[in-house]
Amino acid sequence: MDQGFPGQHTTTTVTTTTTTIQPNVRFDPSYMRTLPGILKILQVILNFLGFICITVSIYSSHSRGGWFNTVAMGGFWFTGVLLVLYLFHIVEKFSKIPWLKIELIFCSIWTIFYLLAASLAADYGRIAESFAVAAFFGFCAMVAYGYDAWLKFIAVRSGALAQGQHMPKQVTTVTSPAY
């Protein structure tokens, strides 16, 4: 019986995670086919459609219309800029910024804003049909922002990156005693 095995050998397995980030700016249209990309495109479209519905109404100067358009245009511009930042991997270039937390906060606030704005527009929809249609787009946007906030919450909790990858690497080392 060999006295040197297994008591004289040590096996160590270490799992490390490396973060892969490409800091160069480049256009990546494949982002539009991912769930976050589709959500951003949907949000931009819903914001714009709701804004148009209120704007074409003769009651657009009413405070409810002004609030709805403020929410719609705020969402349109913020989400549109984020979409461009992701499409050109600028988010990846500035990976030190907590993008997911920023998006989580924004999407959460915009979910509440759209709940209020769409509810007010729906109530005014009995007077102006365009407000009722805007309310529909507003409630759809509320759901889109709420779902996006949920996805961002899960991503922040798991320590995910906004763009880039965590690559797990496993290293196994076997050490033998020197004879």
Image (cartoon, grey):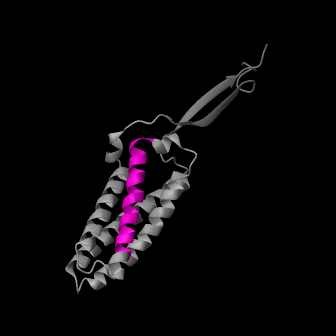
Q: Is residue 69 magenta?
A: yes
Above or below, comparing residue 83 to residue 112 in the picture: above
Q: Is residue 171 magenta?
A: no
Q: Horizontal and vertical percent for residue 158?
A: 54, 52
Q: Residue at 43% of width from left, 68% of height from top? A: 110
Apparent side of residue 17 relative to residue 144 in the rendered image (left or right)? right
Q: Horizontal and vertical percent for residue 107?
A: 45, 63
Q: Residue at 44% of width from left, 41% of height from top? A: 89
Query: Looking at the image, which residue sits at the far top?
Result: 179
Write down the region rendered in magenta. 67-89
Per the picture, the main secondary structure of the magenta-coloured stretch is helix
Which residue is at the front of the view, 119 or 160? 119
Query: Looking at the image, which residue sits at the far right?
Result: 179
Query: The N terminus lies in which quarter of the figure?
Result: top right
Q: Residue at 52% of width from left, 48% of height from top? A: 160
Query: Looking at the image, which residue sits at the far left?
Result: 129
Which residue is at the front of the view, 76 or 30? 76
Above or below, comparing residue 8 to residue 68 in the picture: above
Which residue is at the front of the view, 46 or 172? 46
Q: Horizontal and vertical percent for residue 90?
A: 46, 42
Query: The C terminus lies in which quarter of the figure?
Result: top right
Above or below, comparing residue 27 to residue 134 in the picture: above
Q: How many marks?
A: 0
Q: Residue at 37% of width from left, 54% of height from top? A: 80
Q: Horizontal and vertical percent for residue 157?
A: 55, 56
